[in-house]
Image: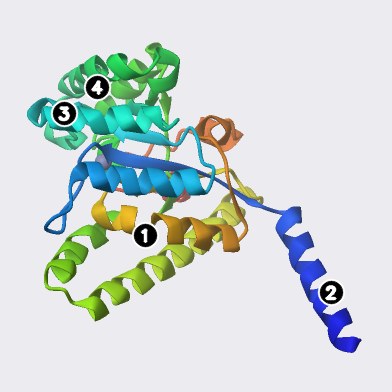
Amino acid sequence: MIRNVVFLILFGVNVLAAQAAPIKMAITVDDLPVHGSMPEGESRLEIAEKMLKAFEKHNLKGVYGFINAKNVDEMPETFKILKLWKDKGQFLANHTYSHISIQKISSQQYIQDILKNEVTLKKLATEQEYKFFRYPFLREGETVEKRETVREFLKQNHYQIAQVTVDFDDWYYNEPYAECKDLKAKTCVQFLKDSYLEFARTKLKESLSLSKELFGRDIKHILLLHIGAFNAEMMDDLLKTYKKMGVEFIPLQEAVNDPIYKIDSKFVAPKSLTFLEQIQKMGKN
Ligand SMILES: [Zn+2]
């Protein structure tokens, strides 16, 4: 009897805690259709299929994939990855044509790179859908001129910036995964899996606490992922892990409506920082 009561209290408290404050987070996936190293015998299409299957299992529709069409032009067979992404009910948006870092070119060249990417996007998505922009390397420029010029272009062209508030360097795992898998080193793969999930948990907790510190409340988060071999392998486990932490996945369109995304951090530096880290540095750089 007592055990039942204890169970009910614990269970009840858990349910209430989960219902009271779900962590709202939109998933975004960068670098479609090609990202990172790949183990021997796997194909880019299989990687996309695996990731999409995990989204399907968790009933996730409208997940934004940010594309670099240069890879499609150089490897035309990868166009079908974008097509598959769309066929499975997910969305596409702009991540520049060549994935160049803004400090390597002028603001005008950067704008041309954004526009060039639209040629492929227009074949697959409506303007309303694809007009989200993700800066490669999360860098907006090392000068005020570049930052402001590109921002003004985005605004005039009805783009919304898809900021990132949760980033656990998921891309980092793809190369060691390919190496461990090619060597058939199971312990090594398992180590990477454990480390990936642990880091994902830690970085989400950090973003939760930083958003509370900065805004005094939970915000609508935006998670950065990449379309790599290991990310696809881990996607189901990653989504389960986040759900266990109380995450409710929301569309990007809903996340960007959080008023915090209207804040302009004015952050100018050749550095990759999340939106929260940029705000933390406001007035200090
Ligand atoms: Zn990228």
Q: Residue furthest left?
A: 74
| Residue type pointed to by label 3 | Val
- Mark 1 burial class by Cα count in 10 Å: few <14, some 14-19, many 20+: some
Q: Which residue is mark 4?
A: 114
Pointers 4 and 1 in contact (CB under 8 A)? no
Q: Which residue is mark 3?
A: 72
Work out whether mark 2 precedes mark 4 in sequence or the reverse, and give the earlier one.
Answer: 2
- Mark 2 burial class by Cα count in 10 Å: few <14, some 14-19, many 20+: few
Asked if 99 appears above or below 107 in the picture, the reply is below
Q: How many numbered marks does the figure carry?
A: 4
| Residue under the image location 28 percent in, 58 percent down | 230
Pointers 2 and 1 in contact (CB under 8 A)? no
The chosen color scheme is rainbow
Measure the alpha-carbon separation of dots 2 and 1: 33 Å
Mark in the foreground, 3 or 4:
3
Residue 30, percent across and down? 31, 40
The answer to whether residue 89 is left or right of residue 169 is right
Q: Which residue is mark 2?
A: 8
